[in-house]
Amino acid sequence: MTDPNTPPREPRYNKKYGYKEIPIGGMITDFMSSEEYKSGDWRTFRPIHIPEKCTHCMICWTLCPDSSIITKEAKFIEFDYYHCKGCGICAKECPFKAIDMKDEKEFRD
Amino acid sequence: MTQKRVAITGAQASANAMRQINPEVVAAYPITPQTDVMHAFAKFVADGKVDTELILVESEHSAMSACVGAAAGGVRAMTASAANGIALMWEIIYIAASNRLPITMNVVNRALSGPINIHCDHSDSMGCRDAGWLQFYSESAQEAYENTLMAQKVSEHPQVLLPSMVCQDGFITSHAVEVVDLLDDATVKNFIGNYTPKYPLLNYEQPMTSGPVDFYDYYFEHKKQQMDAMEKAKTVIHNVFNEFEKITGTHYDFFEGYQLEDAETVLVAASSSAGTIRVVVDKLRSQGKKVGLLKIRVFRPFNNELITKKLENAKAVAILDRSATFGGFGGPLFTEIRSAFYEKTKKPTIINYIYGLGGRDLTVELVQQAYSELEKPKQGPTVRTLGVRE
Ligand code: SF4
Ligand code: SF4
């Protein structure tokens, strides 16, 4: 299992830019860049994968509204915690109870 | 450069400026007293005098939305409105400025309802003073024409990219026939130049997003950019005024004085009232009274440093506001001008008159009354009304 504290990608927009550095008027000039914007930081609950129970049925991957289930060759690999909003749909819908929702507080330093 | 001298209304003067700018898109909805602007412009469209796509929308909210869409697409977009029409487009007025779209809107100033009223006061545009638009006020049809041309150029400047309101007084200016000198089309075309949009959406090479959600992490930065652009607009306006002066021979400034040099008592006003005050200044000057006038041409951005320089030598100044601020300490012109003097050691006594609401005439007698009260400015409240019955 991948350590949930080591997310897969470092979003470029993790850095907070100053007003002189960004395009005016809220324009987004980078095509298809939304993936690089860290939008998972308001999550209250964090999904935790239990690999022993997982059958890689891909139901969570199908249903996650934020495309935050990362898979490889039809196998569950990890959650994308930079974009996962903690909605809990994956945990609720997993037929094998292979996802647990934990309070985000447990992962704070 | 050739000029054509014509007898037209203020509304027709604005429409002629729009014709010469020849914007790709104009979207508008009729509202008195603005309707005459679009009436005249629609005729130019029908007669094939412009290449404009005229969108006849179902409301002012849609008019400004269509302008926002067109401007975001990357073309010149213009509209005109007044009073309740501006109130209805309020939401999109902010969006136009926040998305940094250089739309120019002719505002034919009219009192906001209610009770319902179709005549002039400045409550509509003054209500928008913090919306992020540049604001130009026009004394005459000539100024409505010239301000529209200059506003367009300032708005489109890469360091500005903010929309402009060009205001003229409803009926008083918009419907009165005056002599106006129109520049020839080629001169205007050359002055305005070609428009190169900064972030056009109609660009397959570089797809972009306009107007996305913008939360606590960046909204504030975008507002700071708008504040910055307003500050930079001061220099740009100054330069555009100078450039236009070379064409017309008329001197333009943020604030324009009349008999101001040695004036002891000064009235400050925007738009057509300046014309009435000028008549009274001449009359009182012939009686040896040291009176003067300062006309506001540009209210946004507000050039606070300049206005203190213009007024510091006076003994007493009355600011005339054609809009009320209910529960506030005076009208919008008054509060900003008086506040600009706070740090200064040399400053006149400054009082405020609220006047002309709902089209109430500012008569010569009322202006004389104001000048005479200014001789003893501290007798009476700081914020007063002029021309209301007890
Ligand atoms: S739904 Fe459950 S079992 Fe299926 S892939 Fe996701 S975690 Fe594994
Ligand atoms: S909690 Fe919601 S957002 Fe996060 S991975 Fe599960 S379904 Fe996706």
Image (tube, helix red, strand yellow):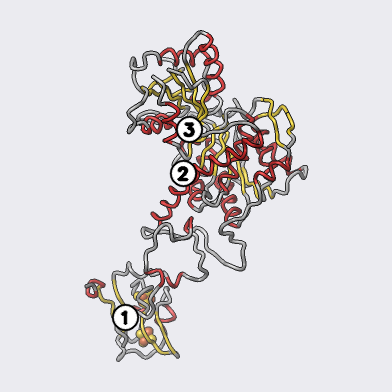
CA–CA distance in space, label 1 to label 2: 44 Å
In percent of the image, x 61 and y 33: which residue is there?
A: B144
Q: Identify the amino acid type marked 2.
A: Ala
Q: Quadrant of residue B177?
A: top right
Circle 3: residue type: Ser
Near-viewer residue (B95 or B242):
B242
Out of A103 and A37, give the one closest to the viewer: A37
Ligand 1 positioned in quadrant? bottom left
Farthest residue, direction top: B287
Q: Which residue is mark 2?
A: B131
Q: How many marks?
A: 3
Residue at figure coordinates x 51%, y 64% from the top left = A29
Mark carried by residue B123:
3
Q: Chain of mark 3?
A: B
* Residue B380 found in image quarter: top left
> In the shown orientation, is residue A100 left or right of residue B354?
left
